[in-house]
């Protein structure tokens, strides 16, 4: 019996860890998750970065939550990050991203004009492929440069991974209308499974978190900062629950041996 339970738990663990996690919405009205908690990564132009590893490092003291994902190179788009999400509540959701930029030029002072955009799929379920192209399947997101003045620099330095800022998803690169996603048929008893995908557009962009919200929170973003968005907890990785399940199986095994 123990072997059956352990084998099933190990299989479930591999499903979540080896093939990517499915993230479950925690409460109606909002759905926050970490950018690095993707299910699949297509192509080579996105990668995970941390304070110790990656093509770029997240500096110590950064306001990033955990790790982040980094666009190694640009495209239109050529590389994709897909998230498997389960919604438990219907609604029309606005999307917010927490981003940073790394200067890839050699100019002095630094220039961040070619590190400030990425693509968001126009809807759930868009395949990780070029499809209809920009402003058809993929809406360009031009994030603003939010400057700060580091204590060791005489010139403003927009981000470099030390600061991550919030921005509302837009309908296209030329529109100020918000991008929205409609969820219909979701419930706690029967969550609605969808895929959400982003694509690379310019190298040097880093993404920390995503938040879907049925309440438009753009007015709470000031200078790229938002206490409301920061306060929305990210969905936990299912793999953490699997660790607990494996621990429980181990406890059962120890008790069985004692009997």
Image (cartoon, rainbow, N blue to C red):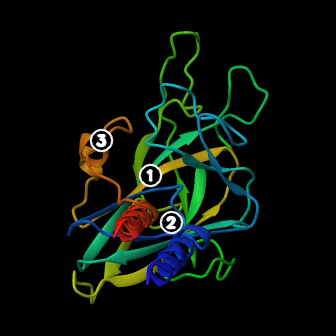
Q: Position of residue 145 (x, y in %)?
A: 52, 37
Q: Please name whichever residue, 251 or 227, is drawn nearer the observer in this view of the structure.
A: 251
Q: Nearer the viewer, residue 188 or 160?
A: 188
Residue 172, numbered circle? 2
Vertical placement of residue 78 versus 110, above or below: below
Residue 222 image-quadrant placement: top left
Q: Vertically, is 140 above or below 12?
A: above
Residue at 57 percent of width and 24 percent of height: 157
Residue 98 relative to residue 202: left or right? left
Q: CA distance from mark 1 to mark 2?
A: 20 Å
Q: Which residue is mark 3?
A: 226
> Where residue 181 sits: x, y (%)?
37, 75
Q: CA distance from mark 3 to mark 2?
A: 23 Å
The residue wearing badge 1 is: 209
Q: Residue furthest front?
A: 259
Element at badge 1? strand
Could you tell me which secondary element the residue under label 2 belongs to? loop
Q: CA distance from mark 3 to mark 1?
A: 13 Å
Relative to the observer, which residue lies in front, 154 or 174?
154
Bin the neighbour count of mark 1 within 10 Å (Cα to Cα): few under 14, some 14-19, many 20 and up: many
Residue 125 seen anywhere in this rendered image of the structure? yes
Quick one: label 3 or label 1, which is nearer the N terminus? 1
Task: Answer with mark 3 or mark 2, whichever residue precedes in sequence.
Answer: 2
Residue shown at 35%/55% (left/top)?
234
Asked which quadrant contains residue 250, the reply is bottom left
- If you read the primary sequence from the N terminus, does the residue marked by circle 1 or circle 2 appear first? 2
> 73 left or right of 243?
right
For the N terminus, which image quadrant? bottom left
* Mark 1 and mark 2 residues within 8 Å of each other at the beta carbon: no
């Amino acid at each position: 019996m123990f072997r059956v339970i352990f084998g099933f738990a190990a299989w479930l663990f591999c499903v979540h860890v080896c093939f990517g996690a499915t993230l479950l919405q925690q409460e109606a009205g909002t759905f926050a998750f970490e950018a690095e908690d993707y299910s699949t990564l297509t192509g080579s132009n996105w990668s995970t970065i941390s304070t110790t590893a990656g093509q770029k490092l997240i500096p110590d003291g950064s306001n990033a939550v955990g790790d982040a994902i980094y666009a190694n190179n640009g495209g239109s788009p050529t590389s994709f990050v897909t998230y498997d999400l389960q919604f438990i509540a219907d609604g029309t959701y606005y999307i917010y991203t927490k981003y940073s930029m790394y200067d890839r030029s050699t100019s002095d002072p630094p220039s961040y004009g070619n590190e400030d955009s990425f693509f968001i799929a126009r809807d759930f379920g868009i395949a990780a492929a070029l499809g209809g192209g920009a402003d058809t399947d993929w809406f360009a997101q031009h994030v603003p440069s939010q400057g700060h003045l580091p204590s060791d620099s005489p010139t403003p330095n927009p981000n470099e991974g030390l600061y991550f800022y919030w921005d509302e998803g837009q309908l296209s690169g030329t529109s100020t209308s918000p991008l929205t996603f409609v969820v219909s048929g979701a419930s706690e008893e029967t969550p609605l499974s969808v895929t959400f995908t982003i694509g690379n557009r310019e190298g040097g962009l880093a993404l920390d978190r995503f938040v879907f919200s049925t309440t438009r929170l753009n007015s709470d973003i000031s200078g790229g900062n938002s206490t409301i968005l920061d306060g929305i907890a990210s969905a936990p990785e299912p793999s953490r629950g699997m660790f607990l399940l494996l621990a429980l199986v181990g406890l059962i095994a120890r008790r069985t041996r004692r009997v």
